Image (cartoon, rainbow, N blue to C red):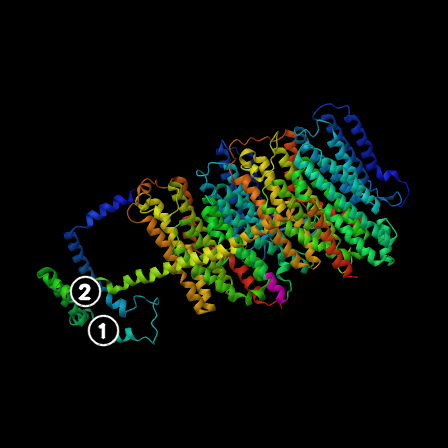
Amino acid sequence: MHTLFDFALATPEIVLLALTGLVLLLDAFDHDAGRRVTFTLTMATLLIVILVSWGQWSSDLHGRTFSSLYVADSLGHFLKILSAIAVGVTLIYGRSYAEKRDMTTRGGELYSLTLLMLLGEFVMISAGSMLTVYLGVELMSFALYALVALRRDHLASTEAAMKYYVLGCLASGILLYGMSMIYGATGEIGLAEIAAVIRGGHAQALPLAFGVVFIVAGLGFKLTAAPFHMWTPDVYQGAPTTVTLLVGAAPKFAAFCITLRLLIEGLHGIALDWQPMLLIMAVLSLALGNIVAIAQTNFKRMLAYSAIGQMGYVFLGLLSGVASGQAGANASAYGASLFYVVIYVLTTLSTFGLILLLSRQGFEAEEISDLKGLNRRNPLLAGVLLLSMFSLTGIPPLSGFYAKLIVLQAVVSAGYVWLAVFAVMCSLIGAFYYLRVIKMAYFDEPEDGMVLSTGTFATRGVMSINGLLIIGLGILPGGLIALCERVITQSLVF
Amino acid sequence: MTSEMASSSLPWLTLSIFVPVIFGLLVLLIGRDDHPGPARVLSLIGSIAGFLVTLPLYTGFNPHTADMQFVENKPWIDTFNLNYHLGIDGISVWFVLLTSFITVIVVLAGWEIIKSRVAQYMAAFLILSGLMIGVFCALDGMLFYIFFEATLIPMYIIIGAWGGPNRVYAALKFFLYTLLGSLLTLIAYIYLWHESNGSFDVATWQHLKLNYSQQIFIFIALLAAFAVKIPMWPIHTWLPDAHVEAPTGGSIVLAAVMLKLGCYAFLRFLLPIAPDASHSLAGLMILLSLIAIIYIGLVAIVQDDMKKLVAYSSVAHMGYVTLGFFLFNVTGMEGAIIQMLSHGFVSGAMFMCIGVMYDRLHTRRIDAYGGIINRMPKFVTFFVLFSMANAGLPGTSGFVGEFTVILGAVQFNFWVGLLAATALIWGAGYSLWMLKRVAYGPVANENVSGMKDINGREYLILGLLAIMVLFLGIFPSFFTDLMHPSVNALMQHVAVSKL
Amino acid sequence: MDLSRIGTLLQQWFLNAKRIFHLLIALAFMSVVAGVWFIQPLLFGDFFGHSITVLPQHPAMADMAGEWHGWVAFGLHGLTSVPFLLLVAGFVVAWYCWLINPRVPEAFARSLSWIYRALVEKLYFDWFNEHVLARATRALGHGLWQRGDRNFIDGIMVNGSARMVGLAAATGRLLQSGYIYHYAFAMIIGIMVFLTFFVLMAH
């Protein structure tokens, strides 16, 4: 259904924008240093938005509107719900951390900016044209730049914000430049229209190829793939941990979605051009992420490199979808990548959440050595850490194993057996630093004077659910895997 | 192909796997560091329950068929045809029972000596037990792999949290070494899935037509994981470290059961799926086995740490097993399986004995001991029995396996048999010399003087193991009767070329 | 039930010279009786029935059966055989050397000392086993352990590869210099490489 102005399709975004405005307004009247009212309102907003999207999904609402700038399909609904949940969990974990570090004393911008970031993500997820993609990217990114800088009296955060801003603008510029080349080559900005032009053979080859390179570069930046990954360690480490989690969890959904829409839906005709680029990025990310993480002593930085390595797997799935130039040849590969992203975000929430729970006034639980003897101090948190680390390594029966399994299946089905061997060798190298974390928690004794603050009952409860999901999705992954594949096949047109 | 017995009404294999796991989780939940008693009792109940649940597998077993029995097959992950497919045959039935039996032993062994985080310790062993039984029962390749890999998690924690001074290095070495091989096997399994058009079923894979280079690739990839697990020379070096640093219970489980996971996988996967590659690489495998038997036998003689000595002797015994596999005759194969069972009991018992001594003197060095027979005669009786079994004395289980494999080896080639037979010399060398230095002679020093003889619990453990060692040694047909059809079927399958 | 106590009692009862002498006489007597009674059925009769089969290629027992004339003749013949005479000679020599004139063995030990030494050392078999065979085995085991397992497998392959990865990690870590312009350059260089390979060369 292609109508000009079907506002009903865009209900989640409209609702989100309205409620964000409300939150922004009401926050001015909240003088509590902890911004509890704002927090509650934000959580309510997220809940409402989730319900709206859920309603849309269950009533199978789909279509294109606003001259095909906006797309509503099941992939969109699915990812919007997951993003909102991820943001909600992030805020639950990060609220007291932010409060103790004066991030909410002067105003509830943390919450309103987060909601704006989520809005940007929603726009990205529902993008039907390159313009919307760019709009969403910018909205999300600007909110994130401000969020990273929120702790403005902390040197590391300011430096991280500066780096993120400059490099992010560079990346956005590159993305936009690529988009303009694509427009020049095809004459269209709508993704479905671009695909039609390429299929019809009316696109000019050279600008198209140029544009693809720049677009892939821009996407690589957002998805923390090498060689566009260099912002990741510094930003992850420097930003206040709440914001690190905001940067590292939910935006991955949005970035993945625009990758799917741009490359697989829009540019699938020239898959032969972007597939080798994805291959190089995957190989570099796997190698670099897994090897350099070994040398890290800061847990957040280590997790940043781990993110780079994990994204390598996502790219493996994306490139395996192409066989003999056909982007849709192996559609289950995209479902595999999506599943991988979902599991990765789930695990990221628990790892950074752990850091958030362990930090307290004046003490950042950032170093790996801060985890020493966690099993003695708090077996529950240590257990969740164990599950997360083994899931990231890819050991069954945790869900991370299945994520790696289906991606590797896609890779082998596409015929790249040696690439699969390379990938598992990299994850073997990666196993070392995940095991080192477990070693700290389980095999070492806590150092003297280490006091533990473990957060409130609610946060521990959410953390337990988080951990249970990591193992639960490992025992019964079939449903989620099938769901991921279904939303891909229902939504993307090859 | 279900067993005709009425016991197919209850899902015995699922129970065998999950009863220990559930008890393990319960122990985790109720365990408290300040009151370890309830955790211990619950673990003991759990391990005995786990053992009782596996007994119907023996009583209901049909020894006249090579088909899979107690089969359970339910779809699990539809998207790629990964099924929850369990079943046992003559080759695997004894290992399920061995695992549940050893779990009881291990829970008893850690009763007093583990004082911190008792609940987690016991839970780790119970969960590990369930997972290992899962490995032996799985008839779906990826299900097998999932159970196989999952055993790494509790073992890593056991070695690292309750182990000796160098435990971190040992635990890490164990994990990464094993993981390296296993990841290659993962690729091989995915490749087989792809080649068989989306099936993980083991039987399908066994009958899948593969060309020679495919078989070689699969052989090497599977060998990587299973050879590390067994362990074969030269990728065996993780074992001495892991055994030395692990707590007694960990060493017992590692030696008695975990090594057999690799051996079993040879029989279930490697040989049937790649028979031509197995035949052509048999010479290499026999060579590696002989090196393990002789080289490692020599290395074991000069060890001064008792646990390391027994660890190296494990590698040598496993050399017999792999030798038996690649002789491609029924004698060798059955001998290898008997050797696997026997080694489970004997090395478990040897580690238990060392644990008994270590509990008293907190050292494993041979020169710290001497003449303990004067203070611990009951214990030394058992120690002598198990040392003799380790050396391969007729009448004990150690002899049956080794002798049968030598018979098979001589059928294959006289010189191979001769070299294999020299193991009896090395075995006597390391076992009996250690026994002599530790047990006999005058009391060596004050510490030894103060050693108390074994208490009731230790007596029970050693007694149970001694009964099994003697039973297997005197009446091995009790065990081999169940194996005949399956081994014959395997031999027939492997004799047929897939090219 | 104390096994060691029973052992001590048995020892005390048994280690009495007169008692041993009596027991030996009884044993000798019983040996003669057993011989009289059992030789014929055991060796030349069918006491063993079908448990022992002698193949026709091995005629030793059949030949001997041809010479059998009953236990008396067998015993008397034995008394005149060489082994018996050697037995008596040995008994006489031993009785003389050790009970009558102990200086004879001493004289032998002094004059034929090397034969004496050899016999005492049991023809040096034990020495050979202990100092050549066992020591070589131990040395070989030691060498294989230290050189083979420790230095080569563990040292070079296992720990060596771990060290290599660690070195790679330390080097890779240096890439992250901290300067924004380095990062930006990395991105631009990446784009340049992609452009070169996938646009200029492909088209």
Tell me if A350 is positioned left or right of C61 in this view.
Answer: right
Residue A399 appears in the rendering: no
Is disc 1 in contact with disc 2, using a CB cutoff of under 8 Å?
Answer: no
Say which of B408 and A211 sits in front. Answer: A211
Tell me if B87 is positioned left or right of A147 in this view.
Answer: left
Which residue matches tag 2?
Answer: C116
Which residue is located at x 12 percent, y 60 percent?
A: C98
- Is B355 above or below relative to A21? below
Q: Chain of mark 2?
A: C
Which residue matches tag 1?
Answer: C68
Judging from the image, what secondary structure is the residue with disc 1 in? loop
Say which of B253 and A199 sits in front. Answer: A199
Mark 1 vs 2, N-terminal side? 1
Say which of A120 and B303 sits in front. Answer: A120
Q: Would you call the spot at circle 1 few (<14 residues within 10 Å), some (14-19), or many (20 or more)? A: few
Q: How far across and down, in percent of the image, does residue B265 sit?
A: 55, 56
- What is the C-alpha distance between the residues marked 1 and 2? 42 Å
Residue type, label 2? Tyr
Q: Which residues are magenta?
A: B211-218
Q: Would you call the spot at circle 2 few (<14 residues within 10 Å), some (14-19), or many (20 or more)? A: some
Image quadrant of residue B397?
bottom left
Q: How far across and down, in percent of the image, does residue C48 sit?
A: 31, 66
Residue type, label 1? Trp
